[in-house]
Each structure stands twice: as C-alpha cells, then as structure tokens.
Image (cartoon, helix red, strand yellow):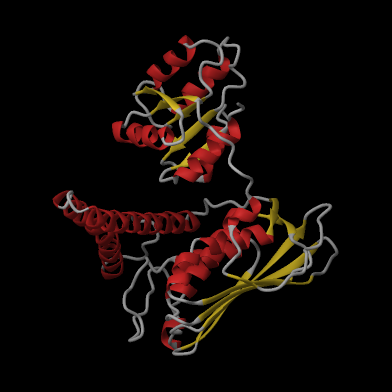
Amino acid sequence: MGAGLHGNGEGSSADLARLSHDLRTPMNSITGFTRIALDHLDDPAKVQDCLQKILDSGQHMTALINDILDQGRLESGKVSMAHQPLSLRATAAWACDIVQVQAAEKALDFQVDLTGVDHDKVVGDGIRLRQVLQNLVSNAVKFTPPGGAVVLTVREEAFEGVERSWFVFEVADTGCGMSPEFMEVLFEPFSRETLPTTHSEEGTGLGMVIAKGLVELMDGAIAVDSRVGEGTTVTVRLPLQLSAGCQAAVAGDVVEMALTADESETCTPPVAGCHVLVADDDGLSRELLRELLGQYGVRITEAADGREALEKVLAADPHGFDAVLLDMHMPHLDGIAVARAIRDSAREDAATLPVIAVSADNFEEDCARALSHGVNAYVAKPFSSHQLISTLAQHVAR
C-alpha cells in the first residue's frame, strides 16, 4: 500500500488518506448494495440493479489496486518490456473495447483512425502498449461530456533505418480540459484536479504517471496539450521495430465505435464434457470456479490443498482429467510444486496434461516462474468467465 508514496510527514499522510478513501469508497458500495440486495430478494429488478452496481464497484476497486501496484513496480524498476510480434490494429481494438460501452452511453463520437499506419505488424510489448492506450482513452471518455468527441489516431513516421518506424498515438477529446496549474503536476503521483465541469475524482491520480513511465521504458515520449473548456490532446511517440516479413496495413476508413478485440480472436471451442480438477484452498474460490465452469458443461473434481490435488491426479486413470486448475498458494504443496510433481510423475499424460494457474499473483515474474515449472497457462484473479473459458479451451483437445 505504500508503493508510490513520497517523502515524509504531511505528504505521505495525505497520500495514505487519499488511498484509504479511494479504496473504501467502492468497498462501501459493494457491502452496501449487497445488504440492499439481501433485503429485497423478492424484487428481482432491485437485486439485478444492486448486482450491477456491485460489479461496477468491484471492477473500479480492481483498477485502483492495479494502478497502485503498477506505480510501485515502476518506481522500484521491476517492470520489464517484452519484445514480441504484435498487431497495432488489434492492440488499438483491445485498448478501446473497455470504454466503448461508456462512450456509447454518453453518445460520444468515438473514432479510431489507423489510416496513417503503413505496417500493422511490429515488435514490442503489446500488453504494456495496450495499458498506455487504455489509460489515455479511458481518461478522454471519462472527462468528455455527453455528445462530445474522442479520437484515437495512429500514424507511422519515418525512422533512421529501414527496420524501424516512429509510431505516433494521439488521443484527442473535446472534454473539460486541464488548467495550466494542474498541467505542471500532471505527471506527479496522486495528482488530480477538480473543475466545475467534473463531478468526481475517480481514480488514484496515477494513470498518467504510469503511462509516462511505461512510454519511457519503451524509449518513447509523451506530451500533453490541454485547455480548460476546450479539450485535451495526448501524444505518444514510440520507436517500434517492424516485424520480420510484416505485411503492410490495409488502408481503410475511420472506424467509428466498431473496432473490437473480436477481430483478432477465434471462436472459442466448446469445453462441455471436459473433466477438470480444481485445486484451491479457498472454498469460495472453488465455488466460483465450479459455478462458472458448470455453466459451460464442464465436470469438476475439487481439491482443497496442493497435496490433495496431486493425490487425485496421480490416482486418476490416464487422461482421466482434461486439465488441472491450480491456485499458486495452497497448504502442504503450492501450485508450482504440484505442477512439477505432475510433470515428473510416471503418468502416461504427465507431459501433456494441461496445467493452468489461477492465481491472485499477477506480476510478470510470477507468471514467468510458473510457466518455467510446468504450467501451461496463467489466469490472474480477478478474471472474467470469457478469460477462463478461452484459456481452458485453448489447452484442452477434445
């Protein structure tokens, strides 16, 4: 919780007080609307409304926690950049998908323009680039009034060499804008501005700080131009290597509220009938997995700790389980120890049985450590049913 807190005395105390407020606010909504729902079980519409507010508050709190952890990792130098092929079009789609519902509810003219991109396939850290764009687009949508406009423009510029290009990502909005005074502290942790045109101080004030830190780790630069009452334009410039054998991007019209991650995803194969071992020492976590997987016709066997999980795998017939879902922190044997023991066993399917980590540890080193010890895939908590089922389907051959 202290990550990103600077100095001593009043500064740190104020930061802690603000963090406490930011986290307690959605938690209060979660507990409050849960009680209301329990008091109105005979009113389905009321319960549904409460459940939606609980979900929204939970997602908001998750975003706050992620911001705090990311800022702490940036300050401690623990964030590393991947260098993998990625699609700029798909990355832009993923980044914008999260705000499309909110943009539609506010009747925003939300556009994504990639007509200035000559090469869609590049090499870089797609996850971190998406995170930067998500932060910028989310801010633009949040602070633009109903009926306004938000545009993400991506264009390619020449670089000193044929294997790289400058890629410029520009997010422009017609929102409330920022004062010159706030612009001076925009990239300082926990900085937030309250204007007459804004109604709340959502967020930690870390979004722009994190975006700047990630952009600089990618050897890029970020600039902001803003005027109160007129809007804001944030420009990110990144030098990206062109992917070997990359294809030129297909020129097209500006995409209006239609660019989604679905373009890059294949249809999820069915998982009905699969037999999955779920190992987690937390009973509610097992119940959640049981309910989610059961909705898709998956048969479940449960284990309450690592030792029980390993015993059930070793006692099962060859190919008796189609996959194993492991929490990483369990009594007696942790998830990695279970995965290694499965791989080292004499089972016929020891090398091929899909082992999927389902863990609250969502740092890169946690994932890398698990994958290097026999785990096939890593699903970080909190997860959506789509994430879970898609991952399972990718590793189960039926």
Where is residue 55? Give x, y as percent. 33, 54
User: Residue 310 or 241: which is nearer the viewer?
Assistant: 310
Q: Is residue 65 above or below residue 385?
A: below
Query: Residue, x 54% and y 68% (percent of image)?
Result: 212
User: Quarter holding the C terminus?
Assistant: top right
Along the viewing direction, whichever of 376 and 149 lies nearer the viewer: 149
Q: Residue at coordinates 39% horizontally, 18% vertically from top-left?
A: 307
| Labels in figure, total | 0
Using the image as rendered, state which of residue 12 and residue 313 is in the foreground.
Answer: 313
The image shows residue 138, relative to residue 301, as above or below, that is below
Taking depth in this image into account, of 197 and 306 the one nearest to the observer is 197
Residue 213 visible in the snapshot? no
How far across and down, in percent of the image, does residue 21 sit?
Answer: 25, 64
Query: Residue 9 in the image: x percent, y percent?
Result: 26, 67
Relative to residue 171, is residue 299 drawn left or right? Answer: left
**Residue drawn at point x = 66 percent, y = 64 percent:** 219
Residue at the extreme left: 39
Residue 320 in view of the camera: yes
Residue 367 lies, with reference to residue 157, above or below; the image says: above
Where's residue 282, x and y in %?
31, 32
- Left or right? Give the position of 250 relative to 261: right
| Image quadrant in which you'd find residue 396 | top right
